[in-house]
Amino acid sequence: ANQEERQFILLLLKRDQHAWRDFVGRYNKLIVSRVLATCREFGVVSQPDLVEECGAEVMATLFQGDMKGLRQFQGRSKLSTWLAVIARRTTLEFLRRQKRDREKTRPNDSQFDIAMISENPLKDSSPIDKDDRAKLQNCVRQLKPTDRKALMLHFDQQLNYAEIGRILGISENGVGPKLHRAQKRLKKLMESKNRQT
């Protein structure tokens, strides 16, 4: 079996198209199952886009740089065992990197930098006057529905990134940048309104 796997690796290294199709057919489910298991182990909700990104990262680890990763297989274990280890290690690195990135961006993404808007900008109890409230609500209505919803979920309902991601159907990691872009759009609209008055 090891001899057969070494031959299979040689075909992959020669970029044999049949071997590539065979590789995907044989090992795609294994890689996906290891990604899912590692996400569970790391306490991460494994959404389809996350699994796809991790799977792509595993393939990149194996095949980038003249297939450097794949060349490291020495046949001391079964190819499936070796791939499971690579998939787990690569997924862990990906998830840790994602967590670090999220922690770096979260403080800035959660700051609403329009000074006149309180933490709950859409509630009637906010201490801003009627004119400003009317301008704000008018500008909020001009945002795209998903931007409007993201801001309301974050500022009005004070949900965390994971909850907002589930409601909007995006990854938790995508929530911070989405909020940041929505805030910038709202700020531009507010500045434009202020210039007009």
Image (cartoon, helix red, strand yellow):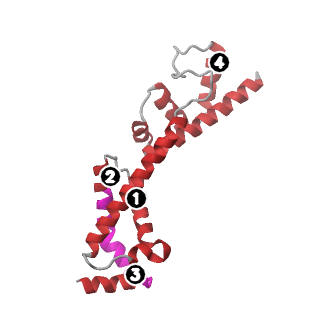
What is the C-alpha distance between the residues marked 2 and 4?
45 Å
What is the C-alpha distance between the residues marked 1 and 3?
21 Å
What is the C-alpha distance between the residues marked 1 and 4?
45 Å
Q: Quadrant of residue 22?
A: bottom left
Outermost residue on the right side: it is: 196
Q: Amino acid at mark 1?
A: Cys
Image quadrant holding the C terminus, namely top right
Q: Which mark is residue 132?
A: 4
Instruction: Kindly indicate whether the residue at mark 3 contacts the one at mark 2 (C-beta within 8 angstroms).
Output: no
**Residues shaded magenta:** 12-36
Q: Residue 78 versus residue 160: which sits nearer the camera?
A: 78
What is the C-alpha distance between the residues marked 2 and 1?
10 Å
Image quadrant holding the N terminus, namely bottom left
- x then y, percent, for residue 118: 55, 21
Q: Which mark is residue 39?
A: 2
First in residue order: circle 2 vs circle 4: 2
Q: Amino acid at mark 4?
A: Asp
First in residue order: circle 2 vs circle 1: 2
Outermost residue on the left side: it is: 1
Q: Amino acid at mark 3?
A: Leu
Q: Which mark is residue 54?
A: 1
Question: In the picture provided, is 78 more to the left or to the right than 127?
Answer: left
Is residue 142 at least partly visible in the picture? yes
Q: Which mark is residue 12?
A: 3
Q: Is residue 78 magenta?
A: no
Report crowding for label 3: few under 14, some 14 to 19, many 20 or more residues within 10 A (C-alpha).
many
Instruction: Kindly indicate whether the residue at mark 1 contacts the one at mark 2 (C-beta within 8 angstroms).
Output: yes
- x then y, percent, for residue 142: 62, 32
Q: Amino acid at mark 2?
A: Cys
